Image (cartoon, rainbow, N blue to C red):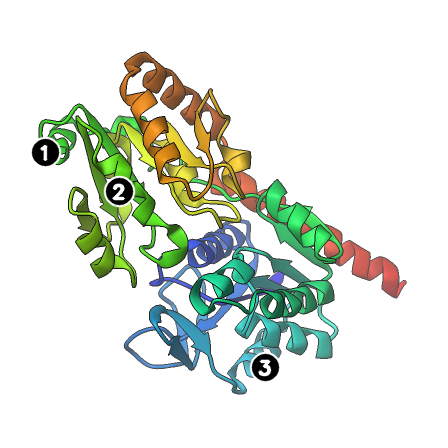
Amino acid sequence: MRVVIVTESFPPDVNGVARCALETARHLVRRGHDPLVIAPFGGSGPVGGDLDGPCAVVRVPSMPLPGYPQVRIALPGRRLSAALDGHRPDLVHLAGPFVLGARGMAAAARRRLPTIAVYQTDLGSYARTYLGGGGATAWRRLRSVHSAADRTLAPSSAALRELTERGVPRVRLWPRGVDSARFHPGRRDAVLRSSLAAGRKLLVGYVGRLAPEKEVRLLAETSRLPGVRTVVIGDGPSAAGLRASLPEVRFLGRRTGDELARLYASLDVFVHTGPYETFCQTVQEAMASGVPVVAPRAGGPLDLVDHGRTGLLVTPGDGGAFRDAVRRLAEGTETRIRFGAAARRAVEDRTWEVVGDQLLGHYDEVLAGRTAVAA
């Protein structure tokens, strides 16, 4: 099968859309298919094709989003259409479509190509966070793109419900995988944990982008708990402000690969504060690492965290609720161990290979549906 993946983000970008697009391309290659990735140009080097990933990647010109340079917006041009014509795909996969994805949808429609659109980002909430409004406009655009697709894939039951309630048709559930070999309790490093905890009883950590929608500021009360050391792993536009406003927190910057896996596994509790996650991959990675999770009772974490068994769900936006949940886990060593073991069991079989085969099942159903209509 020849597939074109049109994605709003791709490595070296570090975010959920980029990671999922990369893992999708890798799985297609493993299964003997022929993918091509089309993504915004986001760094140094020539604009055009490259072979840094598992398959060829066509980069289109882009510009940084004002106020958030880590996000790039693709500019108009003919490169996308030329890439589609050159690859001659059987199906077009749109990853987190909004700007480049909308153009990919239009180009696929003109060529009568089957399309699958993968919903990954709550852009309506992001618009309210960054612009103070515009959520309705963002949803109109999202609804237009996803309604044109043969099938939309939602990463969680909460996302599926919202898409359906907002009038998007043909929505199915497709979760995300996790590298349960890399993110593993065996990566726990007692020396690393001791150096980070600095004599404190409990080591609490957050991993993710440092941006307004993640609400990392809610860790303030947790960071002041006696005997608790809080670390933040990641980078983003809010980094400087958070360092100033959270003096008790140790900021480690961006970490990746095996180093990140050791950090996850060396935590005693993982806390995710953002309420707008359509899935929340960092929660799943912490669970695979055998770490109990505290997360908002909203969005993707509702599917991932079994309250009272693998972690605790708390009221979104309530710093005191996060503090109280962490305090409860600080006081119960046996509870933390039990939660962590259950968390690992809950996600260890959700590999990218398993999830990738589920995606191929969606591809086959869409292609079969197009064949039936043609017949």
Q: Which residue is mark 2?
A: 220
Q: Which residue is mark 3?
A: 81
**Kind of residue sitting beneath label 1:** Ser
At a point 46% along the width and 45% down the height, the residue shown is 280
Choose between 103 and 296: the one closer to the eye. Answer: 296
At a point 32% along the width and 32% down the height, the residue shown is 323
From this view, report whether residue 294 is shown above or below residue 18: above
Q: Disc 1 to disc 3, how far (Cα)?
A: 52 Å
Foreground: disc 1 or disc 3: 1
Q: Which mark is residue 181?
A: none
> Residue 95, image x and y in percent?
55, 61
Choose between 245 and 194: the one closer to the eye. Answer: 245
Choose between 236 and 356: the one closer to the eye. Answer: 236
**Kind of residue sitting beneath label 3:** Ser
Q: Disc 3 to disc 2, how far (Cα)?
A: 48 Å
> Residue 184, image x and y in percent?
33, 31
Residue 22, quarter of the rendered image? bottom left
> Residue 36, image x and y in percent?
52, 67
At a point 21% along the width and 41% down the height, the residue shown is 231
Q: Which residue is mark 1?
A: 195
Looking at the rendered structure, the secondary structure element under dot 1 is helix
Residue 227, quarter of the rendered image? top left
Circle 2 Cα neighbour tier, 10 Å, few/some/many (<14 / 14–19 / ≥20): many
At a point 63% along the width and 60% down the height, the residue shown is 117
**Mark 3 or mark 2: which comes first in sequence?**
3
Left/right of residue 176 with respect to residue 201 in the rendered view = right
